[in-house]
Amino acid sequence: MTIAPPLRYPLSDIDYDEQEVEAVAEVVRGKWLSLGPRTAEFEETLAEFLGAKHAVAVSNCTAALHLAMLACGLGPGDEVLVPSYTFVATANAITYVGATPVFVDITGPGDLNLDPGDVEAKITPRTRAIVPVHLAGFPAAMDRIMAIARRHHLAVIEDACHAIGTRYAGSGGKSFPGRMAGTIGDAGCFSFFANKSLATGEGGMLVTDDDAIAARVRLARSHGMSKSSWDKASGRATDYDIEQVGYNYRCTELTAALGLVQLGKLPASTRRRKSLVARYRQRLGGAGGLAVPFLDRIDDSSHYIFPVLVADASRRNEFRQRLLARGIQTSVHYPPVHCFTHYRQACPDTPLLERTVDAASREVTLPLHPLLDETDIDAICDGVLNELGEM
Ligand SMILES: Cc1ncc(COP(=O)(O)O)c(C=O)c1O
């Protein structure tokens, strides 16, 4: 039996302390566990933080994406443009409503976000929406994407899972500078999964400035019921109607309580992530055998993960194994969605997407979380540079 080496530097970790413990304990003592006052407070606080008109808390981001697709009226026969360089949930949510994901290439190894030129090239008479993903926390080129969407009357649903708290700087255009990622399109979707910058275990939020989208999502999140159990328990309603078929995508009060504490910590933890990324770049920015995507951008990111690209794809796995032997955990963000068995079969006409396949085959994600300090980053970089030299 081989014994795994101790993991000195896990890929991610979360900043949890007695505040989270107390917030959950308070909900447990109060014994109201799902959709109630904590959820409402979490929604209001996050909406204000992001500068969005509405925020609707749901059970996870995949549910938020699903409800966004429904609320934007997407369904069978519709095509939705989406990067293949994302977590599979982005494409799955398109599939849930019977629409067809049409995979778009990334800009290149320096910018892993979807290429607006390829977005435009893939528009057909059946295209109805674009789903940009703000990879690693760096917003996609929303000026160009929104301009394309307006020209072709397309909905834009932002998968902002990586980008909570990112301020959009604009990509050379004059639109949207200073707006938060997730608040530029028709709807924005966030994840509070266990390893996210705002972590509650499971959890998600849909934000929108559109009253009709918000109303549809609120209804569909809880079975299509016109009133909630909390409305009844607090004396605001005695019965309810079912106005449409809905889902159980409710947020729990425990999740909302954790989310409120985590949201309070977010600005400081994002600042920490940014200074760690600056240190990584100082050490690795000019290293041979390695490229650092998004190298010219630092302020317009929440720095959720730190991706690097090794020069030689065939040595990537060995490199990762060697780092693991030094106690440095790594990951791969992401295997391209169009290369998975299901999507190869479901979308057989997808072209090669050369830039996506190239970057994905060379990508290695290094540890990044707010519990690291610069000494840790130096130790990780020493390991990386040593292994690059030896390979
Ligand atoms: C880019 C992206 N989209 C969607 C999701 C799905 O989020 P959730 O796990 O909250 O459903 C994730 C989560 O890992 C993600 O990283």
Image (cartoon, grey):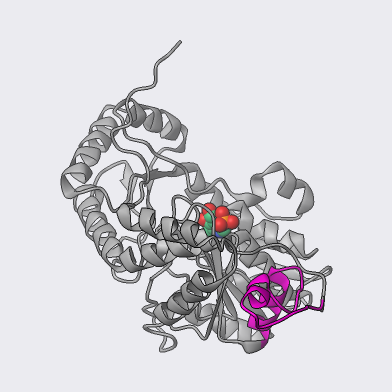
Residue pushed farthest top? 1
- Position of residue 137 in the picture relative to residue 244 (left or right): left
Observer-nearest of 308 and 120: 308
Quarter of the view holding residue 226? bottom right
Observer-nearest of 116 and 12: 12
- Relative image position of residue 2 (x, y in whole percent): 42, 13
> Could you tell me which residue is drawn at 32 percent across and 58 percent down?
19
Res 175 visible: yes
Quarter of the view holding residue 26? bottom left
- Position of residue 7 in the picture relative to residue 181 (left or right): left
Res 355 visible: no
Q: Report ligand 1 position as a quadrant.
A: bottom right
Quadrant in which the C terminus is drawn: top left
- Position of residue 60 in the picture relative to residue 77 (left or right): left
Observer-nearest of 292 and 375: 375
How many marks are shown on the rendered structure?
0
Observer-nearest of 191 and 83: 191
> Could you tell me which residue is drawn at 55 percent across and 63 percent down?
204
Q: Is residue 238 magenta?
A: yes
- Relative image position of residue 268 (x, y in whole percent): 26, 65
Residue range (magenta): 212-241
- Relative image position of residue 48 (x, y in whole percent): 42, 82
> Could you tell me which residue is drawn at 76 percent across and 77 percent down?
73
Q: Is residue 53 magenta?
A: no
Above or below: residue 185 compared with residue 350: below
- Relative image position of residue 377 (x, y in whole percent): 22, 45
